[in-house]
């Protein structure tokens, strides 16, 4: 079972990915987490992407595609993956489809967490207070929302056409969203 947690920044993808990982043993692959780790290590990659991330823009497709490809390769016997924050562009989605197909696998389900902009900004502000992420300023966040609307939301038709997209009410609480995800994952398994 491979699934994509999809939706705007601060919609709750990371929270739900961690729940699914704990409950189902799926491996969470978060490009945001990987890129932040690279920045913290101060690696060449981290130095290259830091300014782009702080500005709320997308890092180049080839960078994130290479990160995902390497991680998938490290977990050859995983029961499945949760993609969180990837893919964000059509090129990334096509690369992911090809990568999985090469392994005789595929995306089974795309869960779209729908959340209003006002609520996203409230969640981002709370996270800024708790975690002090460099890109959780109102200015950078507004750019991330714009990048989502302009570049990432165009993937929704890609996955509707594949019959894989399920819309969930991301405005509900963490537990309710988790229950809705469990229902969707259970139905996809059946
Ligand atoms: P959020 O879900 O809150 O938007 P992420 O942690 O997923 O945040 O991503 C943080 C930043 O990392 C993005 O704003 C972007 O600069 C970069 N990033 C993460 N994933 C990708 C991706 N798949 N493609 C391009 N850039 C990415």
Image (tube, rainbow, N blue to C red):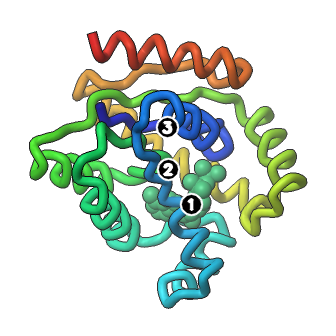
Report whether the residue tagged 2 is closer than 8 Å to ligand 1.
Answer: yes
Q: Residue at x 72, y 64 (%)?
A: 135
Where residue 61 appears, as percent x and y from the top left, is 36, 67
21 or 89, which lies in front? 21
Left or right side of 133 for 98? left
Residue 151 visible to an observer of this rendering: no
Ligand 1: which quarter?
Answer: bottom right
Instruction: Residue under label 3, please give it.
Output: 21
Where residue 88 appears, as percent x and y from the top left, is 43, 52
Q: Are marks 2 and 1 in contact (CB under 8 Å)?
A: yes
Q: Residue at x 39, y 34 (%)?
A: 156
Name above or below for residue 32 compared with residue 168: below
Report whether the residue tagged 1 is closer than 8 Å to ligand 1.
Answer: yes
Neighbourhood count class around disc 1 (C-alpha, 10 Å): few under 14, some 14–19, many 20 upward: some
Secondary element under disc 3, as helix, strand or loop, is helix
The CA span between labels 3 and 1 is 15 Å
Q: Are marks 3 and 1 in contact (CB under 8 Å)?
A: no
Secondary element under disc 1, as helix, strand or loop, is helix
Name above or below for residue 41 compared with residue 65: below
Residue 15 visible to an observer of this rendering: yes
| Labelled disc at residue 33 | 1
Neighbourhood count class around disc 2 (C-alpha, 10 Å): few under 14, some 14–19, many 20 upward: many
Q: Residue at x 79, y 34 (%)?
A: 118
Q: Between disc 2 and disc 1, whose residue precedes?
A: 1
The CA span between labels 2 and 1 is 9 Å
76 or 71, which lies in front? 76
Q: Between disc 3 and disc 1, whose residue precedes?
A: 3
| Labelled disc at residue 85 | 2
Name above or below for residue 105 compared with residue 167: below
Neighbourhood count class around disc 3 (C-alpha, 10 Å): few under 14, some 14–19, many 20 upward: some
């Amino acid at each position: 079972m491979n699934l994509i947690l999809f939706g705007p920044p601060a919609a709750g993808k990371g929270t739900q990915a961690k729940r699914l990982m704990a409950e189902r043993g799926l491996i969470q692959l978060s490009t945001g987490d990987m890129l932040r780790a690279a920045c913290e290590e101060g690696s060449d990659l981290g130095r290259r992407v830091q300014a782009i991330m702080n500005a709320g823009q997308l890092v180049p497709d080839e960078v994130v595609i290479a990160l995902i490809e390497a991680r998938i390769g490290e977990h050859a016997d995983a029961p499945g993956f949760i993609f969180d924050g990837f893919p964000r562009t059509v090129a990334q989605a096509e690369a992911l489809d090809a990568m999985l197909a090469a392994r005789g696998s595929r995306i089974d389900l795309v869960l779209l967490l729908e959340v209003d902009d006002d609520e996203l900004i409230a969640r981002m502000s709370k996270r800024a207070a708790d975690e002090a992420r460099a890109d959780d300023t109102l200015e950078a966040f507004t750019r991330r929302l714009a990048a989502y609307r302009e570049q990432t939301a165009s993937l929704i038709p890609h996955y509707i056409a594949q019959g894989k997209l399920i819309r969930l009410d991301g405005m509900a609480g963490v537990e309710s969203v988790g229950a809705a995800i469990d229902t969707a994952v259970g139905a996809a398994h059946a």
